[in-house]
Image: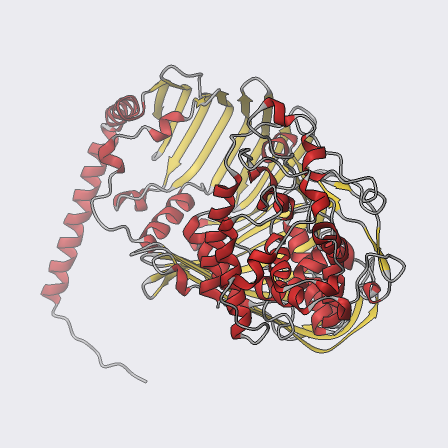
Amino acid sequence: MQFPKINIPKKYIRIGAWVLGIFLVICMVTGAIAYGKREALLKKMVARAINKAKVDYNLDVKIGSAGFSGLSTVHMTDISVVPQDRDTLTTISDMTIGVKLMPLLVGNVKLAELGLDSGTINIVVKDSLTNLDFILKRKKKDTVSTGKMNLADLAHNLLNQMLYKIPDDMQIKNLMLRVNDNDTAKLSFLTTEATIVDGALKSNILVNGNEATWHLNGLLEPADKQMDVTFFADNKKVELAYLNNKLKAQLSFDTVRTQLKKAAYKGDAYKITGSWAVKNLLVNHPAIASNDIVVPNASLDADLLVGENYVALDSTSTIFLQKASIHPYLKYTLSPHKIYELKMHTEQQDAQTFLNALPQGMFESLEGLQVSGQVKYDMNFYLDTKQPDSVQFNSTLTPKDLKILKWGTTNLQRINEPFVYTPYEYGKPMRNITIGPSNPNFTSLNQISNNFKNAVLTAEDPSFFKHKGFVEESIRKSIAVNFKENRFVRGGSTISMQLVKNVFLSRQKTLARKVEEILIVWLIENNRLISKNRMLEVYFNIIEMGQNIYGIGEASRHYFGKSPADLSVGEGIFLANIVPRPKIAMFKFYGDGTLKPYLRGYFRFLGNIMARRGLTPSDTSSYGFYNVRLREGLRQYLLPDTIEVDTTVFDNEDDALPVINTQDESKNLFDRLFGRAKKDTATVKPAQQDTTKTRKQLREERRERRRLERELEKAKKDD
């Protein structure tokens, strides 16, 4: 293809040449003038910067000498930065800074060169004060936004500012960072050398003398918005005892690698593409698990989107755990109100690969488990903080031809046969209970009154025989209620989950134990390892129903002197009522063995639900409330009706027994509340507890009434 010739008159060419020449002359003259006065301009700029630091941040900045050592390179010596009334922050013996000229013409300061020799940075913490407090002391006019903040533009500007500060060439020697935390922890990080040559970053950092040598190495290409940096230690894991103590945890790893691959606007959003990877990550924290959690290999290929009012991890991102992969989607919307979104998706993949990808040490009961088949997982969560009741939640782990080939640490089918159950209270084992015919208190399901079975199922898990271990609607409502209350007031556990928690898992309240509980329930329910009837039978025989009272056999005889088959509707409803807080069962009775009147509403409500479902005849006299009588032999252990009792101590399994408000009544409190006649102690022994704790005392009726009101309100919404 040939382009047509364009004939430009020579006079226009001459005019253009003159204009260009004049422009070049002006630039040269301006440059010459600026070059001649640059030392004076530098002094003014330095003085202005020192004054601004003093006015805006209360910083005393001193510079021994400052001058140009090249066309755009400034050399400074004897620099110090001291916050007002604080310890010296920085001292630098010798520093050279060079900037790029072309970006400077449009107002961007990009570093071309950085040299530093012999510097110290001191971070000092004394009580709640530090010598970094000045960062929070910008003048008010600088911190108040004058318009609507666009997060996309903010992300773009922040990333650019970070990249602009990466020089093309860098030579740092003997830069010391010291941290003094209230004289209890003193740390030092000596960068003996850190260089950037042709984009290659290399560094040597001595930690606390010769305790460890760290390296931050990689390739930096800030102009292309790219970097690839790896953080590691010589011949050992990266670990810092100071951080472990601060976090109350142990944290270490072999290497961490971070990559920035691309950053650019995509429509109205700013998209940052990169990755993050870690090898042999070890975490130990009491809130996560009771032992070390090890992740051999984990990585994230991430597409981060920053919009005008939101931040999101796009669904094109992928999490890799060993050979398994997961696609996450997270989005946090800030305005006009906060919205949280989370989605997880996996393609159908080998079940054993998925199982092997789980962090080592996180699921003790499942270690060594071997399976065949495939699984797929999908989860969706959406919470609009303005409409928490409309929260969305669903979670599905879908199996295909899944089979268990070999049990791991725990045989999940062992409860199909008689077994020994050991309940724990206050972190200590109580006693061994045989769940089988050899135990006279064991009661088979067909020997338990329907009045009790129906009451407990109605109150605890109405859809037990229909669901597969989980009730998403119950979990969804729990999320909404807990969010509105800003605290945990409602759980979403099914009977299946309670059974697994008590029989297979430790009593420790950790994230790992909760996830392990969910996985075990899923395995049992989806593989039909245990029938629903057997699960319910075991549950009824291990459930705590009073101080050192376990199972319906012990409970029915203890409270009413009856066998489980003979329980009335009222007695069944009462026993269902004490399941959430079994240790305060005795406080629900008057001294003559009758129930306190605040329970009547609970009886009517639960009884009406049971009647509507055809589980019991309709009853206008509160479904046996007036006929419930505590066994006469136990009435001698009841407190006088006028005694004030703080029952809040039973809300936490680590708490002690209640304290009453008169010294005379506090004597032998344990024996009076939970003691038994000698003929009873042969089958059930009371636990030994510490009664020395004191709390603000409340009337038991008032406290329990408030709990029941919340429970009834919850039941109304669920029904």
Tag count in the figure?
0
**Residue farthest along the right direction in this orientation:** 438
Q: Is residue 103 left or right of residue 171?
A: left
- 2 and 251: which one is in front? 251
Residue at image position (56%, 73%) is 617
231 with respect to 54 (left or right): right
Residue 331 picture location, percent across and down: 43, 60
Asked where in the image residue 412 lies, by quadrant, the reply is bottom right
Q: Residue furthest bottom?
A: 1
Residue 135 is situated, as x and y percent measured from the top left of the image, at: 37, 30
Q: Position of residue 89 (x, y in %)?
A: 44, 21
Identify the residue shown where x is 41% and y is 16%: 86
Which residue is rendered at x = 24% and y = 39% of the image?
144
Q: Is residue 605 above or below residue 252?
A: below
Q: Answer above or below: position of 31 versus 508.
A: above
For the question of whether residue 489 can be seen, the reply is no
**Quadrant (top left/top right/bottom left/bottom right) for the N terminus:** bottom left
Question: Looking at the image, which is closer to me, 328 or 673?
Answer: 673
Q: Position of residue 388 (x, y in %)?
A: 40, 59
The answer to whether residue 42 is seen in the rendering is yes
